[in-house]
Amino acid sequence: DSGVTQTPKHLITATGQRVTLRCSPRSGDLSVYWYQQSLDQGLQFLIQYYNGEERAKGNILERFSAQQFPDLHSELNLSSLELGDSALYFCASSVVAGGPSSTDTQYFGPGTRLTVL
Amino acid sequence: AQSVTQLGSHVSVSEGALVLLRCNYSSSVPPYLFWYVQYPNQGLQLLLKYTTGATLVKGINGFEAEFKKSETSFHLTKPSAHMSDAAEYFCAVSKSGGSNYKLTFGKGTLLTVNP
């Protein structure tokens, strides 16, 4: 158990709909990352938040958005869903120390499997 | 930009045999390197990581990896495979320094262990 929790475990919805995925980081971790795992694209970084602020963006679609709340949990919102959005969405958390010699390790949650029909 | 290439999408070994999973990376700055394992229907678990210092890194479950800068490689090995090692393995790279440690993953290698 990594200490990162994600809800729900499974989500089945229809095209055009909107869903929200939730992530609670490990206690004390300030940074949250979102990744998408699909058969054709593999594991791809979507977005990072650090202490409530967006820190980095990856291959995240405009239909997708995220935020990190004051209690440090994060939500990933997916809207106008398409069949191709079906994937496993992972959240990871870490303690980001910052600075040129800092190191960090990301701990992954169990994921949310999204199926768009 | 950083990238990771995992040679062999599927590796099959016999129980007790050597496990060798290959990973080559590309990075314009000194990299941090990771191996993660994913068991069926589960999240990713960190096996080991290289940041600085000793180039031979030991991880959990008897796995180790060696960072070879000249070969831009970070291959994962285990002397003797166990049935419980059957899983998908991902090599990943991130940049050293700063406060953005986004991981760039390889496409994964599925390890099958035969009795």
Image (tube, rainbow, N blue to C red):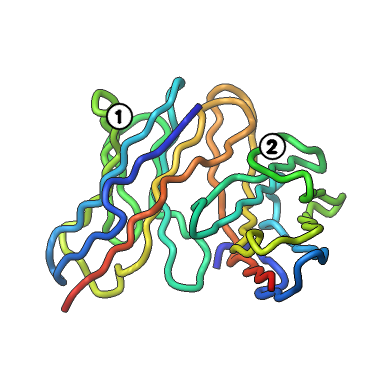
Q: Secondary structure at mark 1?
A: loop
How far is the residue under mark 2 from the one under mark 1? 26 Å
Q: Give the residue at x 77% y 57%.
A: A78
Image: A48 above or below B109: above
List x then y, in percent, for residue A4: 64, 62
Q: Is residue A45 left or right of residue B83?
A: right
Q: Quadrant of the N terminus of chain A?
A: bottom right
Q: Secondary structure at mark 2?
A: strand
* The one of A101 and A42 positioned closer to us in this rendering: A42
Q: Give the residue at x 58% y 67%.
A: A110
Q: Is residue B21 left or right of residue A81?
A: left
On what subunit does the disc labeled 2 rest? A
Residue B72, numbered circle? 1
Q: Is residue A102 left or right of residue B27?
A: right
Image: A28 above or below B51: below
List x then y, in percent, for residue A116: 69, 69
Single out the residue that lies furthest toward the bottom.
B115
On the image, numbered disc 2 is attached to which residue? A57
Residue type marked 1: Thr
List x then y, in percent, for residue A8: 71, 73
Q: Give the residue at x 72% y 45%.
A: A61
